[in-house]
Image (cartoon, rainbow, N blue to C red):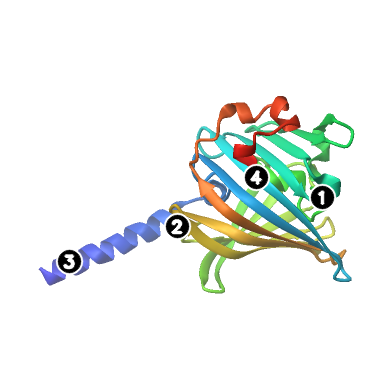
Amino acid sequence: MRIFSSVIAVLAVLFISSSSFALSAEEMMKKSQAAFLYAGKDFKARVMMKLISKGGQERTRELTMLRKNYGEPGEEQKYFMYFFQPADVKDMTFMVYKYPKKDDDRWLFVPSINMVRRIAAQDKLSSFVGSDFTYEDISGRDIEDDTHALVKEEKLGDKNCYVIKSTPKTADVDYSYKLSWVDKASYLPVKEEYYDRKGELYKVFTADEIKDIKGFPTVTKRTMKNLQSGHTTTVAYLKVDYDIGIEDSLFSERYLRKPPKKWIE
């Protein structure tokens, strides 16, 4: 009986290893996208963002982020963000309709001029409220927009990772390729390196803290550093929650101008 159990255990390990090995690099990135950007049916967090200059001066952004999925990972999503501080962005709201295989729609409400401004698709690479993240970073990039290749497997800290090279199919981004360290256990990206068109490393993302929230491994602290400018952005997610029943009506121009308190506080 003991020998039989051992054989079963060995076969199970071989099956699991074979199944993981059988995943293509694109399938790994789809699993990573699902874990990082599509966990739960919906999501809410209070976000503290620090913008740190090369000289060490800090500026802070505080906002509430809400996200709702419409379908399977990789399909439609909607995002809504409300800014509490600083004073020059207080009451500003930002909304994204994310679509598969076409440009996302993005709107920004600027209270100082009482105007909803549509963000043009070509502005997706612009800085998001002065940070080192772009508008596209907020909702993520379509997996099909890049070709993916497994470069190697290696340990990063205490995590065993796949290292995947993603190369844009078109010149619609400001980098030539990206390397992602994807945790084999959670499929969360724990590090990303962006290389410019000369092939030089210029931007690095790191997942600095991961917590289990309602069964979903969640990156609760992250950093994006621009090695060329010396500017850094750190982001902390507080009061994170999933599956809270966000209403569809939130994602409208009406609530961009006057968001309901029950969702933003």
Spatial CA distance of label 4 from label 2 is 36 Å
Sequence-earlier tag: 4 or 3 = 3
Q: Residues within 10 Å of mark 4 (few under 14, many from 20)?
A: many
Give the residue type at disc 2: Phe
Spatial CA distance of label 2 from label 3 is 24 Å
Which of labels 4 and 3 is toward the front?
A: 4
Give the residue type at disc 3: Ser
Foreground pick, 240 / 171: 240
Q: Tell me where residue 76 appears, x and y as whole percent.
A: 59, 32
Spatial CA distance of label 4 from label 3 is 49 Å
Quarter of the image for residue 112 reads top right
Give the residue type at disc 4: Met
- Residue underneath mark 2: 21
> Is residue 88 in sight in this rendering?
yes
Quadrant location of the C terminus?
top right
Label placed on residue 5: 3
Foreground pick, 146 / 244: 244
Label placed on residue 65: 4
Sequence-earlier tag: 2 or 3 = 3
Q: Are marks 1 and 2 in contact (CB under 8 Å)?
A: no
- Residue underneath mark 1: 174
Secondary structure beneath disc 1?
Answer: loop
From this view, report whether residue 87 is shown above or below residue 18. above
Quarter of the image for residue 136 reads top right
Spatial CA distance of label 1 from label 4 is 26 Å
Tell me what residue is drawn at x 61 percent, y 39 percent. Answer: 263
Spatial CA distance of label 1 from label 3 is 54 Å
User: Going by the picture, which residue comes out furthest to the front?
Assistant: 261
Quadrant location of the N terminus?
bottom left
Q: Are marks 4 and 3 in contact (CB under 8 Å)?
A: no
